[in-house]
Image (cartoon, rainbow, N blue to C red):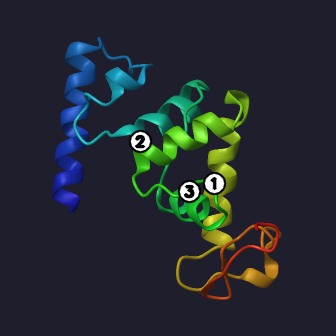
């Protein structure tokens, strides 16, 4: 795994130097042409380095979005589109950080801390069981 990471990092650096004159690209379309860079990584770079909004769909964002009923989709690309339609653009970067932080600290994949979560009324996964959220009919 680390061999591929190293190969991709070296390939990305080479391409940035040769094709982008040593400047990290500032568009999603250009970033995803770099070795090892997909939509998730490109959106992280755009948001964190350049303040350009994008939705980052990692494992935490995917899990939480499904559990709280934001999306029924299963692919990162479709979830990204759902979130983009739902959220104002000026919330995207902060939303990414909040969802990832919540997924790491509270809504763990295998052992969620449901008693510490303020989203239990809209969540379909409480104490390890799938349920119909209280506010949904």
Image side of residue 19 versus residue 122, left or right:
left
How many numbered marks does the figure carry? 3
Pointer 3 local density, CA inside 10 Å: few below 14, some 14–19, many at least 20: many
Residue at image position (80%, 79%) is 116
Task: Give the percent coordinates (x, y) of residue 125.
Answer: 64, 78
Q: Element under label 3?
A: helix
Image side of residue 14 versus residue 132, left or right:
left
Badge number at residue 125:
none
Image side of residue 23 versus residue 102, left or right:
left
Judge depth for marks 3 and 1 and give the one in front. Answer: 1
Residue position marked by numbered label 1 in the rendering: 70
Residue position marked by numbered label 3 in the rendering: 61
Looking at this view, is 101 or 67 the one in front?
67
Give the CA separation, mark 2 to mark 3. Answer: 14 Å
Residue at image position (20%, 16%) is 18
Residue position marked by numbered label 2 in the rendering: 41
Quarter-of-image position of residue 20: top left
Of the image marks 2 and 1, the number of the one nearer the N terminus: 2
Q: Element under label 2?
A: helix
Give the CA separation, mark 2 to mark 1. Answer: 22 Å
Q: Quadrant of the C terminus?
A: bottom right
Quarter-of-image position of residue 16: top left
Task: Give the percent coordinates (x, y) of residue 111.
Answer: 59, 86
């Amino acid at each position: 795994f680390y061999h591929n990471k190293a190969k991709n990092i070296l390939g990305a650096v080479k391409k940035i130097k040769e094709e982008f004159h040593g400047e990290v690209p500032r568009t999603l379309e250009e970033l995803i042409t770099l070795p090892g860079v997909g939509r998730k990584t490109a959106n992280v770079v755009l948001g964190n380095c350049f303040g350009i909004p994008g939705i980052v769909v990692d494992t935490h964002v995917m899990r939480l979005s499904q559990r709280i009923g934001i999306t029924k989709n299963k692919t990162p690309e479709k979830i990204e589109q759902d979130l983009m339609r739902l959220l104002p653009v000026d919330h995207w970067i902060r939303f990414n950080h909040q969802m990832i932080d919540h997924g790491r600290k509270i809504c763990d994949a295998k052992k969620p801390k449901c008693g510490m979560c303020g989203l239990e009324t809209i969540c379909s996964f409480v104490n390890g069981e799938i349920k119909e959220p209280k506010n949904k009919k």
